Image: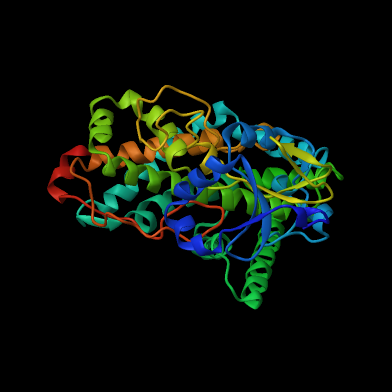
Amino acid sequence: MPFGTEQFPVIDLSPQRDTLASDPYAVFAELRAQGPVHLVQLPDGDRTWLVVGYREVLDALKDPTLSKNWLKATGQLGPNVIGTNMLTADPPDHTRLRRLVSREFSARRIEALRPHVEKAAAELLDGLQDAGSAELIEDFAMPLSLGVVTDLLGVPFLDRAAFRDWTNDIIVPSEDPAREDQILEEITAYLDQLIETKRHRPGDDLLSALIRTMDEDHGRLDHDELRATAFLLLLAGHETTLNLIANGVHALLRHPAQLGALRANWTLIDQAVDEVLRWEGSLTYATNRFTTEPYRVGETVIPGGGSRVLIALGSANRDPGQFPDPDRFDIHRPPRAHLAFGHGIHHCLGTPLARLEGAVAIRALLERFPDLALETEQPRWRPSMMARGMETLRVRWSPLTGAGER
């Protein structure tokens, strides 16, 4: 933390470690009542400025003086980073990297994937039909979300299990530094081999297209950037969508009136997905930013020179100043700009794909199993400082009720 922060009081969040995992919104409400920004000590011992008010979060997300370049701010790449990608770059590098990928995520291209996503969801549900129960994350949400993004990038099917293990370790980091180093070495070695294989046997996929860009237009994309971009797309492309599906099903099953309204009118599905994203979004925080000059939030001036700034998306989306009765889950809520996908130049590139997958998956599951129910009312939330997801989500249904829904 840069010189000058010693003048500010520090709020120690370490005693609230468990609450931050199970119900961060209660902690955020207390912090918002005291002000829109605070210097806090996180449960892992790190200190950061935490922005919690909706307006202040929105402003921070789009402020160009807050840098995403961890390397420039700290002299290190940052935890669990294997190179420069869109999330760790500022313009002009960010602009260049995002432009190379963005054409693959146009609304038209994503909509063209709908039949593929619907088919994949139906096949997974066919396999679960007669079981009568499932662990929804491992048996449905994970293989669906991971399958879509690995197909998009062209990652071989047999390697998907390895990627799931790696991303689990990234989202909930090991306390063993040697294990963290091993994970990054494994990821780096695998992606290097995959890139080399695709260079000799390219396919009709995003990774092959990026390799052609690197080989044919030297300077627009180097090898380290390509590798880091590939992993970012794999990690962000399945982890957040997995959580959206699981969090959405959990929210609807906990709110029978909302579930009934959706079943009665499937035109509400997109609106329901947006309410899930607001109420229990896939990310609690945006990735780290750093001050390049003094940054004012309300009456507080955060010192420049690399002060770490953590932006609480989950807090902004429950701010009563923006969303009346914010803790109520309501799929009829009038549309307002939630910040689950961020804002500004770092707004999530995969937003259209995540929304499509979430809507398709939730509708397919609820239509197939009309009596779908939770087996566990209180899930265990993963102790992650970024992702908002459950460790498990067990559901049940009568196999007979779903037999005629195919």
- Where is residue 226? Give x, y as percent: 73, 51
- Where is residue 81? Give x, y as percent: 70, 59
**Residue at the farthest left position:** 400
Left or right? Give the position of 290 relative to 144. right
Protein image colouring:
rainbow
> Dividing the image into 4 quarters, which one contains the N terminus?
bottom right
Q: Residue at x 71, y 54 (%)?
A: 228
Along the viewing direction, whichever of 69 and 153 lies nearer the viewer: 69
Q: Vertical placement of 136 versus 174: above or below?
A: above
- Where is residue 397? Give x, y as percent: 19, 50
Q: Quadrant of residue 326?
A: top left
- Where is residue 91? Give x, y as percent: 81, 38
Kindly tell me whether residue 395 is visible in this rendering. Answer: yes
Q: Vertical placement of 199 versus 79: above or below?
A: above
Q: Quadrant of residue 299?
A: top right
Along the viewing direction, whichever of 133 and 2 lies nearer the viewer: 2
Q: Residue at x 67, y 67 (%)?
A: 184
Left or right? Give the position of 365 relative to 382. left
Left or right? Give the position of 308 relative to 267. right
**Residue at the farthest right position:** 219
Kindly tell me whether residue 282 is visible in this rendering. Answer: no
> Dividing the image into 4 quarters, which one contains the C terminus?
top left
How many numbered tags mark residues here? 0
Left or right? Give the position of 189 relative to 241. right
